[in-house]
Image (tube, grey):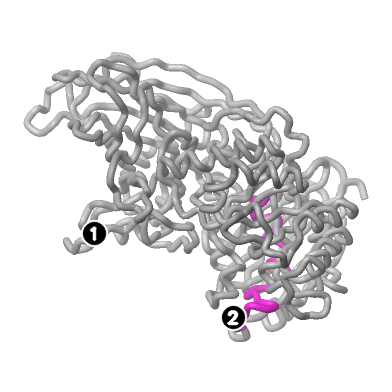
């Protein structure tokens, strides 16, 4: 019999395919096509169905046999302009499973699988064939069956039209089920992280969505003991909303589904370090990338458009104040948020003159990004993007996307392509989870799928628990726009929601650490310029880069704490933060190169739990053979710059 198993190059992960005979046909050749996954010789996912529900067709995959398999191997070798690493070299072993129905109509499909050292990926390939005129997907029933009731961090969403602006709530997988037969469907966003104690850490997500709709996850069991997940593909959106009419995916043949991804590791940090989501996406389609430059931006919206006089003003003159601040701080960008235009994004309202602001900024070596509403972009981008290029705008922040059906996913690609043609970078805001498009269109710098500090203005205490969770959940699949940098730091008891000079729970040192912990190529410096005046710790925000050559997760547990080190040239940066529990972390510095380094350390002051603004700044000589002890206050953090040979 041909091999139906493929292992990772390091042999830690094995992916196996088989057919489960239907009831009463135990010896039959045909049945449900399933896969299973093991890690370090321990089962992680037991037999899980691979099945497509096609419109007006019986399920494809429910009554098939494995006709043949094709083994192979390869290496993903490429460079990234922005992200966790500048150069990626990931080897994999592969297997194509050719499945066929034994009975009429004899339809065929393939499962193309790859196994990396830290991940499994597979997708459906449906070839041209007489038995199928077209690929019309009603629903994809890919199962993910952990061998135990795993502890999961689930992003519960209200429906298929969501900004993904919610929390990852830890709970057992069985808690997501249809309890006690009561009709309920809990929709969860990807990626979903799971811990199977004594077995592995795992995460389920997806990559390369072009031509498809996005995947959600649901526990369909209706049982308090049920603990598996099934894919749910976003139905089409109409003017009336997500009405569910029509195929979720409608395409000609041959057709490839999106990649289904399972990350695996001994620690959650291994999942964070993975580049598999970009591995599975097509190569860069932008020939000249010299104009694509990640960096930090000053920003008017979060602090309430506060001016030099301490009063809010959405005017050209006040926005020049933010440009001046960017220039003085060495930041390349100023982000002009909502309010400069109305429904017609070719015209200005008259409060802020965008071309004038761009001209003023250019004299100070600063470029301007502008905010846009997604529906207006959809209606006018063919005219608007050439206009913005003429104005000299650097990039567009497109907000309230709120869809990831097939047409919506195609819109992301259309925007990225057209923006690149007009030398515009893109920050998708109020958007779905990333899937690796930034490799194909490197002008896409960020996706905002969690609000971060923005929620503090509305009264929700976004805080240290969320910040210790997002790196292990939302950040797994790509860069994120979290908007760190709040300097009005207060305790939980002191917190009051307000629009002007908003407050931030947790310590200031934690805000500094976020610039290293988070993968955020376009990083907002969120507070008003006055908030940073005469604050020595602001120096770290000036120094820290926003894109990296290498990433190392040194420790951490979702919702508890995390320490990440990142390399930029010969320098290294470290960010560490904790939830509301104070802790001492012992961090080996083995990631450093040879020789000595000066560590510029920004850490919680001794009274930071009571006075969260207090930061202690000190320098210390270190080398790779040493271990550094970090003292983190409750809600606190630490940020370090390592300078070689100094």
Give the answer, above or below, for where 42 lies relative to 522.
above
607 or 585, which is in the foreground?
Answer: 607
Q: Position of residue 321 (x, y in %)?
A: 83, 67
Q: Position of residue 444 (x, y in %)?
A: 63, 43
496 or 358, which is in the foreground?
Answer: 358
| Image depth: mark 2 or mark 1 in front | 2
Residue at the right extreme, as displayed:
646
CA distance for labels 2 and 1: 36 Å
| Left or right of residue 520: residue 436 | left
| Left or right of residue 369: residue 228 | left
On whether residue 496 falls in the magenta region, the answer is yes
| Left or right of residue 570: residue 121 | left
Quarter assignment of residue 273: top right
Q: Position of residue 289 (x, y in %)?
A: 73, 34
- Magenta part of the protein: which range? 495-521
Q: Which mark is residue 178?
A: 1
On whether residue 207 falls in the magenta region, the answer is no
Q: Secondary structure at mark 1?
A: loop
Residue at image location 59% in from the left, 75% down from the top: 457
- Tell me if I can see residue 473 in this picture: no
Residue at image location 62% in from the left, 36% down from the top: 441
Residue at image location 35% in from the left, 56% down from the top: 240
Sequence-wise, the earlier of marks 2 and 1 is: 1
Q: For the N terminus, which image quadrant? A: top left
- CA neighbours of label 2 inside 10 A, class few (<14), some (14 to 19), many (20+): some
Quarter assignment of residue 78: top right
- Tell me if I can see residue 144 in this picture: yes
Q: Position of residue 271 (x, y in %)?
A: 53, 45
- CA neighbours of label 1 inside 10 A, class few (<14), some (14 to 19), many (20+): many
Q: Which mark is residue 497?
A: 2
Q: How many marks?
A: 2
Residue at image location 40% in from the left, 45% down from the top: 405
């Amino acid at each position: 019999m041909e091999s139906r198993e493929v292992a990772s190059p390091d042999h830690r992960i094995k992916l196996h395919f088989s057919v489960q005979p239907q009831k009463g046909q135990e010896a039959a050749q045909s049945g449900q096509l399933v896969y299973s996954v093991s890690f370090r010789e321990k089962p992680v996912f037991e037999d899980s169905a691979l099945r497509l529900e096609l419109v007006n067709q019986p399920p494809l995959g429910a009554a098939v046999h494995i006709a043949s398999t094709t083994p192979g191997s390869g290496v993903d070798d490429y460079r990234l302009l922005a992200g966790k690493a500048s150069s990626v070299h990931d080897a994999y072993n592969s297997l194509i499973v050719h499945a066929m129905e034994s009975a009429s109509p004899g339809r065929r499909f393939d499962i193309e699988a790859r196994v990396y050292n830290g991940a499994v990926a597979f997708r459906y390939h449906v070839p041209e064939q007489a038995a199928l005129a077209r690929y019309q997907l009603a629903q994809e029933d890919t199962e993910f069956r952990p061998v135990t009731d795993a502890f999961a961090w689930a992003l519960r969403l209200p429906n298929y039209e969501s900004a993904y602006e919610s929390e990852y709530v830890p709970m057992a997988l069985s808690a997501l089920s249809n309890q006690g037969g009561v009709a309920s469907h809990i929709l969860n966003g990807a990626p979903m992280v799971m811990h199977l104690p004594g077995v592995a850490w795992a995460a389920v997500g997806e990559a390369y969505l072009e031509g498809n709709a996005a995947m959600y996850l649901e526990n369909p069991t209706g049982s308090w003991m049920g603990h598996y997940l099934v894919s749910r593909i976003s139905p089409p959106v109409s003017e009336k909303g997500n009405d569910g009419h029509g195929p979720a995916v409608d395409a000609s043949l041959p057709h490839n589904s999106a990649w289904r991804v399972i990350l695996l590791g001994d620690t959650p940090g291994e999942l964070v370090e993975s580049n598999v989501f970009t591995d599975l996406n097509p190569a860069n389609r932008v020939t000249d990338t010299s104009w694509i430059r990640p960096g930090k931006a000053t920003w008017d919206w979060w602090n309430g458009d506060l001016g030099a006089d301490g009063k809010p003003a959405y005017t050209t003159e006040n926005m020049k104040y933010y440009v001046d601040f960017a220039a003085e701080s060495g930041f390349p960008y100023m982000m002009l948020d909502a309010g400069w235009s109305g429904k017609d994004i070719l015209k200005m309202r008259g409060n802020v003159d965008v071309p004038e602001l761009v001209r003023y900024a250019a004299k100070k070596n600063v470029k301007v990004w502008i905010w846009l509403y997604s529906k207006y972009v959809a209606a006018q981008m063919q005219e608007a993007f050439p206009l913005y290029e003429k104005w000299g705008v650097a990039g567009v922040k497109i907000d309230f996307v709120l869809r990831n059906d097939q047409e919506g996913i195609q819109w992301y690609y259309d925007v990225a392509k057209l923006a690149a043609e007009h030398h515009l970078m893109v920050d998708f805001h109020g958007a779905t989870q990333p899937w690796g498009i930034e490799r194909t269109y490197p002008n896409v710098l960020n996706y905002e799928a969690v609000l971060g500090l923005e929620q503090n203005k509305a009264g929700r205490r976004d805080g240290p628990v969320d910040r210790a969770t997002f790196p292990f959940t939302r950040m797994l699949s790509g860069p994120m726009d979290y908007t760190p940098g709040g300097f009005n730091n207060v305790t939980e008891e002191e917190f009051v929601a307000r629009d002007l000079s908003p407050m931030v729970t947790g310590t200031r040192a934690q805000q500094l650490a976020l610039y290293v912990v988070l993968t955020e190529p376009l990083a907002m410096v969120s507070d008003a310029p006055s908030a940073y005046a005469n604050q020595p710790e602001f120096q770290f925000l000036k120094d820290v880069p926003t894109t990296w050559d290498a990433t190392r997760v040194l420790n951490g547990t979702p919702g508890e704490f995390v320490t990440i080190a990142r390399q930029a040239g010969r320098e290294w940066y470290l960010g560490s933060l904790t939830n509301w529990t104070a802790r001492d972390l012992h961090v080996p510095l083995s990631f450093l190169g040879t020789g000595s380094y000066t560590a510029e350390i920004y850490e919680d002051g001794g009274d930071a739990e009571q006075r969260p603004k207090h930061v202690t700044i000190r320098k210390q000589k270190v080398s790779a053979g040493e271990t550094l002890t970090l003292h983190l206050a409750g809600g606190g953090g630490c940020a370090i710059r390592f300078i070689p040979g100094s």
